[in-house]
Image (cartoon, rainbow, N blue to C red):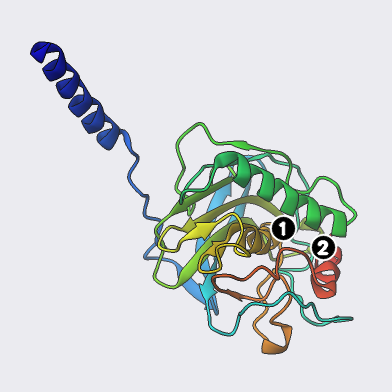
Amino acid sequence: MKKIVMFVSVLSLILNVNLTFAKPADKGFKLPSNAIEVTPNVFSLGEAYDMKSHKLVQGYAIVHKKNGQARGGNAKPKGSTTCYAVMANGAKWKNVEDWEVFPGAGLDGNFLLDRLTHSINTWETAAVNQNILGSGSLGIGPVVDPYTLDNENQVSFGTLESGTIAVTVVWGIFGGPTSNRKLVAWDQIYNTNFQWTEDALIETGKMDFWNIAIHELGHSMGLKDIYNSSCSDVTMYGYGTEGETKKRDLAPADITGINILY
């Protein structure tokens, strides 16, 4: 009997050690040292060759900061026509590409897939365009460096700079003739230095994933941040905070902005 107990104890210890080593380390996704801030919270990643379009494209990392101005409440401004901006006129998706999401920060993968899909549908419905960002799936391969152009559109979690809630990276052609401009790739990283929740109406001290994700997806579709404090209730307002849920749906200005592109 003593031998059996000892065997079980040793086996449990081995399993615990293996589980400890099997747990993936939190990835660090801080901005590359050569990233250049070209406008507030927008960093140029330089040029890269896109294997799909066979063209040189530009990359930008859009940083979503925490700020005390963006507080709770769910009211939306009515009739706003100025609280929106696009990255560049005509810089939109012309080809449909699928994407994948990797669980993180204690959030269930199926929940993440559902909320991202729902938020994409919200933007696409507003644009009267039912297939801008394609379909999503749970990630099964490695998370590729989000600051490098590749053939993957990925949503993942990792450590970012202090005060940064999330970063969306967008690659595309933003200059030259408007008809030639387009988006070719996107990635998102959500900062694990913050606590995340499926519903900040219940867990008010945490970041509401739905609230933040629909904002980030606006960037993936070609919209810029808005920093005018009179626009603080629109989804594309550039700051966020814990407990905020008012960006889960779109304000009239957000709808106007997405319709400029699509």
Looking at the image, residue 4 sits to the left or right of residue 113; the answer is left
Of residues 89 and 237, the one drawn nearer to the viewer in this rendering:
237
Looking at the image, residue 196 sits to the left or right of residue 24; the answer is right
Q: Is residue 151 visible in the rendered structure shown here?
A: no
Give the percent coordinates (x, y) of residue 156.
Answer: 51, 48
Of residues 143 and 202, the one drawn nearer to the viewer in this rendering:
202
Q: Is residue 225 visible in the rendered structure shown here?
A: yes
Residue drawn at x 72%, y 78% is: 233
Q: What's under tag 2, amino acid-wise?
A: Leu
Q: Which residue is mark 1?
A: 221
Secondary structure, mark 1, is loop
C-beta proximity under 8 Å, tags 1 and 2: yes
Q: Give the label on residue 261, or none.
A: 2
Q: Quadrant of residue 123?
A: bottom right
Q: What's under tag 1, amino acid-wise?
A: Met
Q: Residues within 10 Å of mark 2 (few under 14, many from 20)?
A: some
Secondary structure, mark 2, is helix
First along the sequence among labels 1 and 2: 1
Q: Is residue 227 above or below residue 94?
A: below
* Quadrant housing the N terminus: top left
Residue drawn at x 52%, y 48% is: 107
Label 1, label 2: how many angstroms apart (C-alpha)?
9 Å
